[in-house]
Image: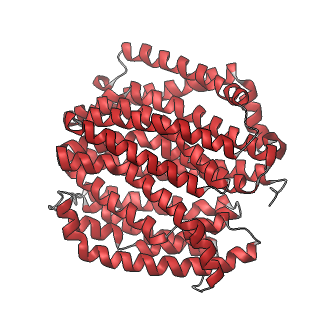
Amino acid sequence: MRAHPDAARSTARGALWLATNGIVVKGAHTVVLLALAAALTPSALGLVALGTLVATVAAILGGLGTASALVHLPGSAADAQRAARTALTLGLVTSTLLAAGLWVAAPSLASALRAEAGGAAVIRGLTVVLPCLAVAGVTTELLRRRLAFARRIVPDTVSAVVGAVVAVLLVAQGVGVMALVAGQVVQALLMMVLAWAVHPPVLPGWDRADARALVSFGLPFSGAHLLEVVQLNLDYLLVARVLGALALGHYSLSYRVANMPYLMVAVVVTGAAFPYLCRAQGPLRARGVEVALAVTVSLMLPACVLLALVADDLVLLGPEWAPAAPVLVLLAGYALLLAVLQVGLTVLNAAGRPGHALGVRLLHLLVLALVLLAVVEAGIAAVALGQVVAVAAVGVPALWLARRSVPGTSAARLLADVRPALVATAAMALAVVALRSLGLDAAAGVWAVALLAVAAVGVFLVVLRTVGPQTWRSARALLSRPEVLA
């Protein structure tokens, strides 16, 4: 199917809507994380990390990838609407069965993960809402297929903010880790209700041909996603088993902070680009790939450099968090490389090669497992360095496969696109070093660190505007001229 003439403009606007959603949702999650870190011990935060891991894996298994398959499914809007009924049936059945199984297995899982003290309750609370997520997922993916991003973000954004408020209020009341559980339950229920508010509810149904089409794409797609989650959390499992809950608490805080730019930038950009790249052909698709990669690198690079430069300021949460600082420096570099890999995998999926994406995920998992098993006993800093080594080793073949799947991409054009951000990031780093030498650090208080961050962003934007005016003009034109991607 050829891309609609307005697809590029819709994708650009979608990226802005998804960026807004990403900032709000991940910002809300960050507030909850920092509130938990300030109120709980590192070992308690490790319990939260393990419970969230189980819930994330369960959500992927419960959906079978059929909701995401609606975005890629060929045919008309009516065909997608009909297939959505089958996707909903599959998601409801599998997620309900999985939630029931996890309720029974929660004590055993908690024991296996060395989280006996409260672990079962956290797992049960975070997984009981799986059917709600399955229902909301079908609706939101239908909206993403139609590039209706403005409505797509409403359930995510509003439910995340309300859930965060509930969690923070309960943390302030001394509820502990169950505050996160309560916030997540509220978020999932509200997401389902709001999905019905922005789109007519999808009713369960069944069509054998639709089921085959959805599962044939959805299974490798969800398999790749599951491998991604296992790969992203293998470090958690090994740190918990070998080094214990205290080390996991330190590591998980660093990982979650470093992962925020990845979630706000890479996931947002690739989420907006995926439906466009699925339908674009020839030079349109090639230029779309270049733009997606250039935007991702241009935004991730300054964010990750800034995190590395201010890593020592984690002690604002309390002196017990000091061991997390050097880990954050390494994981900031890992997040940047992971974002580039995410673009490559999105390109493979959009080009109709989910099996290749699954193979890359599997390779990443195998390389990471070997590296982490060799270094985990050396401590959490060695684990973070192992993450950097593994993603760098896998990123090269992934980008090679992505480039082969979309002929016509140009490394020269890509370098020209990212050069202004490279210069602006270097200027920002020099400014941060100078300001920290003047006393803008954790010793001067939280407001000093906030002022440092604002100044760093300001320097980056000013220099970017100066050395890369074409970047600004292209960004503005992209909102009104679909041929910018051509």
Q: Which residue is depicted at the point 48% across and 19% down?
A: 429
User: Where's residue 302, x and y in %?
Assistant: 52, 29
Q: Is residue 252 left or right of residue 186?
A: left
| Residue 39, placed above or below residue 214 | above
416 sits left or right of 39 in the view = right
The answer to whether residue 393 is above or below residue 83 is above
Picture quadrant of residue 426 = top right
Q: Considering depth in this image, is 88 or 362 the residue closer to the camera? A: 362
Residue 122, image x, y percentages: 26, 64
The residue under the point 25% across, 77% down is 104
Q: Position of residue 355 (x, y in %)?
A: 56, 57
**Residue 181 at x, y = what percent?**
31, 64
Q: Residue at x 20, y 42 (%)?
A: 247
The figure's colour scheme reads secondary structure
Given residues 146 and 200, the one toward you in this image is 146
The image quadrant that residue 119 belongs to is bottom left
* The C terminus sits in image quarter: top right
View extreme (left): residue: 117
Q: What's the residue at 74%, 72% (across, down)?
A: 77
